[in-house]
Amino acid sequence: MKYLGQLSALLKSATSGRFKDVKLECKHFFSGAAIYANGRICMSLTTVGFRSKTSGRIAKRFGERARAKPLRYFPKAPVKKDYVILRRRC
């Protein structure tokens, strides 16, 4: 429930109704919450962190320039190339 509330608040404050042609929904997702755009998942907030879906090329560049890392659910699991985990500022 904690993640669903946090992600719902983020979605509301970040979009402010600007995406009228895209149906955005926030739902439970395993141990966290996810944002769906027209029925397809595009972001999630779980114990792993906040992840965003993008192209593999953009994800690589984003990771090089920002506080981001590739998504990997388990230590030896393959990297999900189209996702990045955004790190929190300390």
Image: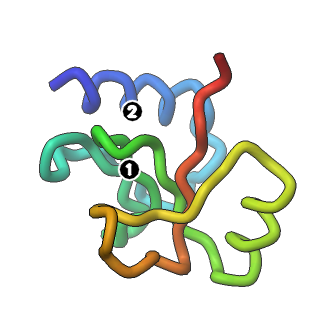
Residue in front for this viewpoint, 78 or 83: 78
Using the image, determine if residue 65 lies above or below residue 75.
Answer: above
Query: Is there any visible trace of residue 9 in the rendered image?
Result: yes
User: Badge 2: how crowded within 10 Å, few (<14), some, or many (20+)?
Assistant: many
- Residue 82 vs residue 7: left or right? right
Using the image, determine if residue 57 lies above or below residue 61.
Answer: below
Using the image, determine if residue 88 lies above or below residue 71.
Answer: above
Q: Who's the residue at 15% across and 43% down the image?
A: 31
Give the percent coordinates (x, y) of residue 44. 38, 50
The amino acid type of the residue labelled 2 equals Leu
Q: Which mark is residue 44?
A: 1
Sequence order check: which comes first, mark 1 or mark 2? Answer: 2
- Indicate the quadrant containing the C terminus: top left, top right, bottom left or bottom right: top right
Label 1 to label 2: alpha-carbon separation: 8 Å
- Indicate the quadrant containing the N terminus: top left, top right, bottom left or bottom right: top left
Residue located farthest toward the right when viewing the structure as drawn: 65
- Residue 62 vs residue 68: left or right? right
Element type where label 2 sits in the image? helix
Using the image, determine if residue 54 lies above or below residue 44.
Answer: below
User: Badge 1: how crowded within 10 Å, few (<14), some, or many (20+)?
Assistant: many
Give the percent coordinates (x, y) of residue 79. 45, 76
Q: Who's the residue at 52% across and 68% down the image?
A: 83
Q: Who's the residue at 13% across and 51% down the image?
A: 30
- Give the residue number, with chain letter if any, for mark 2: 7
Give the percent coordinates (x, y) of residue 67. 72, 43
Give the percent coordinates (x, y) of residue 21. 55, 63
The amino acid type of the residue labelled 1 equals Ser
Query: Is there any visible trace of residue 16 in the rendered image?
Result: no
| Residue contact at pointers 1 and 2, CB within 8 angstroms | yes
Residue located farthest toward the top when viewing the structure as drawn: 90
Q: Who's the residue at 36% across and 59% down the image?
A: 36
Quarter of the image for residue 43 reads bottom left
